[in-house]
Image: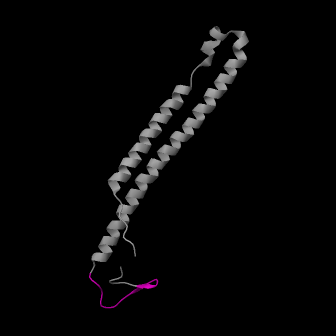
Amino acid sequence: MTDVSVHTPSLADYARDQHTAADVVRAHANAQRGEVGDLTDTFGVIGADFLVAAAYTLDTRARRLDTLATRHGDQGDITDSAATVYLDADARAGHWLSRPPTDKPRNIGNHTEGLYL
């Protein structure tokens, strides 16, 4: 059996970094959204097709950035959850291993309760 150890503060740092990345990317997505109609005076009627294409491109980019921000946030949430689950499982295992062995072994699957490591 191999020992497994998880440094949960590192997981917390990683999760925090993912949430920060989500915030930064979301801010970039919001910056992509703008009123291109204000540029009509600059480009005039001749530039209307260009403005439509620019608006479509900026909106598409903003939606992709929204998706990326969501993925960063989800990764942070999943990492936080994994750290919590690990700590809970480790505490339960520690409690189970610290119990004195019973006189009468009890079968658990293919293993016998007691000093199984």
Left-right relation of 82 to 104: right
Magenta stretch: includes residue 107 = yes
Residue interval drawn in magenta? 100-111
Residue drawn where x is 47% and y is 39% of the image: 22
Residue drawn where x is 69% and y is 23% of the image: 53
> What x and y, as percent, mark residue 114?
33, 84
Majority secondary structure in the magenta region: loop
Q: Is residue 7 above or below residue 28?
A: below
Quadrant into which the N terminus falls? bottom left
Residue drawn where x is 60% and y is 13% of the image: 38
- In this view, which residue lies farthest toward the bottom? 104
Quadrant into which the C terminus falls? bottom left
> What x and y, as percent, mark residue 71?
52, 45
Picture quadrant of residue 62: top right
Picture quadrant of residue 2: bottom left
Q: Is residue 71 above or below residue 100?
A: above
> What x and y, as percent, mark residue 99?
28, 79
